[in-house]
Image (cartoon, coloured by chain):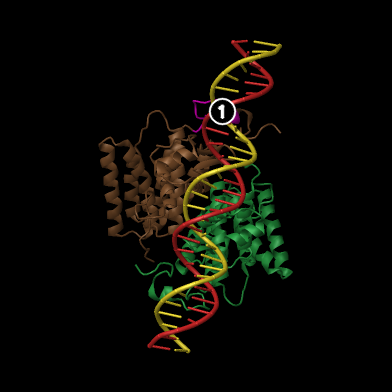
Chain colours: A green, B brown, C red, D yellow
Amino acid sequence: MAHPAEPQRFTGSGKLRPEEQIYQEMLGAILDRRLEPGMKLVEEDLTKTFGVSRARIRAAFLQLAHDKLINLVPNRGAFVAEPTIDEAIEVFSARRMIEDGVVRKVTAHMTANRAEQIRAHLAAEHKAHHEGDHRAAIILSGEFHLLLARLANNLVIEEFLERLILRSSLIIAMYESPQPADCSHDDHDELLRALTGGNPDEAASCMARHLDNIRDRLQLHREKPGKTDFASIFGRQPSSKAS
Amino acid sequence: MAHPAEPQRFTGSGKLRPEEQIYQEMLGAILDRRLEPGMKLVEEDLTKTFGVSRARIRAAFLQLAHDKLINLVPNRGAFVAEPTIDEAIEVFSARRMIEDGVVRKVTAHMTANRAEQIRAHLAAEHKAHHEGDHRAAIILSGEFHLLLARLANNLVIEEFLERLILRSSLIIAMYESPQPADCSHDDHDELLRALTGGNPDEAASCMARHLDNIRDRLQLHREKPGKTDFASIFGRQPSSKAS
DNA sequence: TTTTACAAAATTGTTGACGATTTAGACAAC
DNA sequence: GTTGTCTAAATCGTCAACAATTTTGTAAAA
């Protein structure tokens, strides 16, 4: 059940059609927060940036919208998605479900080689954290979860989790606490111990705790400050004119 | 945590942009097998059928390709996806993982009202099966799983499972045994008992058995007959000319 | 009969332009 | 100071035509 070489990273490097190229590029930008929630994405600006036609940009938009990473508003354009609180809760709940199965499978099929892969990744995480490279730390933290999914040997799950991790990235960008308190790498250490311990139940509960930690560290109680949010006050989205 | 009214069905009926309209239409066609694996989808034919421009068709193609329901081959066009055996195995494996979590959640939060919803659906399934309406039976069978996902109260999971069920539909179309032996509605009965029994472990193992049943009833050992498949014989895709 | 070469048809890929809608700014009225 | 109205700019939505590629069909050559 070995998998062929595939673009397993967010930032694909192999030669792929410009279409996919742009999609990957924007994925990367969302992941490390160069694209912030709510940003307007003007088609013509993007054409200049990437040197392709509008049709190409449009195609990339469709893909991103399908993953809920941007919102496509008719006649208004594309905006980087602003996940609601409910959405955020559901995303983390979904991750708990998925990753529960993932860690169980990984625990059950652990080998020395796989353990070493995880250890190597953790080393990179610690290094980034030690050097104060916050951006790299965030990206590596996401890739840790993706690595586990890959070790679960299921491309379907892997791709799905990749999208959820990207959405998580947007959620964290919107709702993170003032003080980062990014101690998740400790959770990851604990996770490694559980994964190699051979007890699926323990590994699963460890992952559940970890995801709850991330979620609880967010400020999922009030809307993003900065703009008076009538949408939440009146319980409707501001997009549609009165019907 | 109530959810707003949303298009929870494959065949959306609310007024939506023609763009989405076509997408939903083709989803429906795949679900009840009017579109068979491998069929060529010519853009201009579709424009006449739906009365829209090629750009629209193209946009719909992108979405479908993103869900792995069609293949987009450069300069050759779009083809209804032909899931490989490995893909089929992974899809069912993924469903086992996801639906494990789903049934556990549904079991834990079962109410009289929810049980009644399931019962009503099962009645419809039995009716279709009794009347020999094979097409309706297949669709309802898929929607049973989707109903459980909806009762799990997580739109993320629900949408993901919807896509997996559609892929399953293609897989079944490719690899089903000569004799349908469509006794899955019995499995669904058993599942209802487990779900209302209050024991999550039992419900989960029941669902796992059900999905294994479906998978094992398929002929996942040899390629689809009918056309000599050089791609599998020589282990390479037929798209590229000799390099 | 089989293979090769070439031309014609069908199909996809790309571009640019035009119309429709929304947004931003200016200015008058209250 | 706020509100309402209008015009101009920016931006998106759509379409049709053209170019590039692939597929099909035909006929000549081995």
Relative placement, left or right, of B139 versus A151 is left
Q: Is residue B229 magenta?
A: yes
Q: Amino acid at mark 1?
A: Asp
Q: D19 or A137, which lies in front? A: D19
Relative placement, left or right, of A82 versus B117 is right
Give how far across and how far down residue A125 sits, in percent: 69, 63
The residue under label 1 is: B229
Q: Which quadrant holds residue A234? A: bottom left
Which residue corresponds to the image point at 36% horizontal and 40% vertical from the top-left? B138
Give how far across and how far down residue A147 sits, in percent: 62, 54
Give how far across and how far down residue C14 sits, in percent: 61, 47
Which residue corresponds to the image point at 62% horizontal and 74% vertical from the top-left? A181
Residue B101 visible within the image: no
Q: Residues within 10 Å of mark 1 (few under 14, many from 20)?
A: some
Give how far across and how far down residue C5 sits, in percent: 69, 21
Kindly report the secondary structure that dominates the magenta region of the rendered protein.
Answer: loop
Residue extent of the magenta highlight? B220-232
Relative placement, left or right, of C8 versus B176 is right
